[in-house]
Image (cartoon, rainbow, N blue to C red):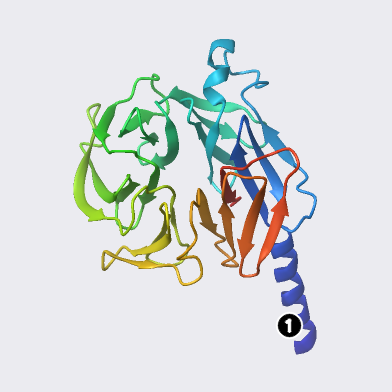
Amino acid sequence: MRRCLVACVLCCLTMHVRAAELICAGGNEVFVIDAEGDTARKMWRWSGEDAADIPAEARRDFNHLDECKPVDNGDKILICASNGGCALLERATGRLLWRARSPNAHSLALLPHDRIVVASSLGGDHLEVFDLSGSMTPVCKTPLHSAHGVVWDEPRQCLWALGFDELHAYTLDAWESDKPSLKLQSTHPLPDQDGHDLRPVPGTQELILTTEHTVQLFDRETATFKPHALLGKEIGIKSVDVHPATGRIVLGEWGPAIRLFEPSGKIQFKDARPYKVRWLR
């Protein structure tokens, strides 16, 4: 009986791993693939070019997509593009739930009180916050050179934001009012320049981030950096993400393939060049 139980558990775990999906953003589309597949077949796809609820004059905003973050257990997806388009999508239908425009948008995150923060990179060089139910005008903004990554830290009630050569932590000030602001709490110089991607490592107190020449881990309790043991010497990584259940790592490099680690793997594309790749929660 015990052997049968163990076998069933292992079988379920294997099925869970094989059922793991990846969401990718690049060019003018966001799409989902099976992480264990070898054909990179697109199981779900969205593009601003053919989305019925994107006005014709705004379609170009969603070219050069550079972020795709699953939220609400994967039922919704945050996307943005360097052309400026930012949106929250309902995955089941592809329906647009929110839209705005931010210069050279490179990442975004949900914040309390139904707000979204956008990292506006070179040309914007700031973080700006929008109300989900409000207008397309930001309710506040704060400068950050080459803003590229944002992570809301619920346990610590702070926002982590990655810039060109610094990692910042912000608290939410007057957040229940109509004049909120992001208050700089701490600044941490990066070990290397050109900060690019920033993600939490599930189940730990660490953030994982990429720069021009390395992949680093940042301990949120001790405020210290260290090179990732496996990926510390990786160069030019556009995105990194760690699966919350299996710990498997996926790297996006803005090319025709993505790499996976622990266990290792590679997915080749014939008609896509993913810029950001995330595990679909």
Q: Is residue 153 above or below residue 18?
A: above
Position of 264 compared to 221: left or right?
A: right
- The residue type indicated by label 1 comes to Val
Q: Nearer the viewer, residue 133 or 36?
A: 36
Q: Position of residue 235 (x, y in %)?
A: 48, 56
Q: Position of residue 118 (x, y in %)?
A: 39, 35
Determine crowd level at label 1: few under 14, some 14-19, many 20+ residues with C-alpha closer than 10 A: few
Q: Quadrant of residue 261?
A: bottom right
Position of 106 compared to 251: left or right?
A: left
Q: Position of residue 140 (x, y in %)?
A: 27, 29
Q: Position of residue 47 (x, y in %)?
A: 64, 28
Which residue was labeled with disc 1?
Answer: 6
Q: Nearer the viewer, residue 199 or 245?
A: 199
Q: Is residue 84 above or below residue 39?
A: above
Q: Nearer the viewer, residue 170 or 5?
A: 170
Q: Is residue 83 above or below residue 182?
A: above
Label 1 secondary element: helix
- Residue at the image point whose x is 67% and y is 45% from the top: 256
Position of 2 compared to 178: left or right?
A: right
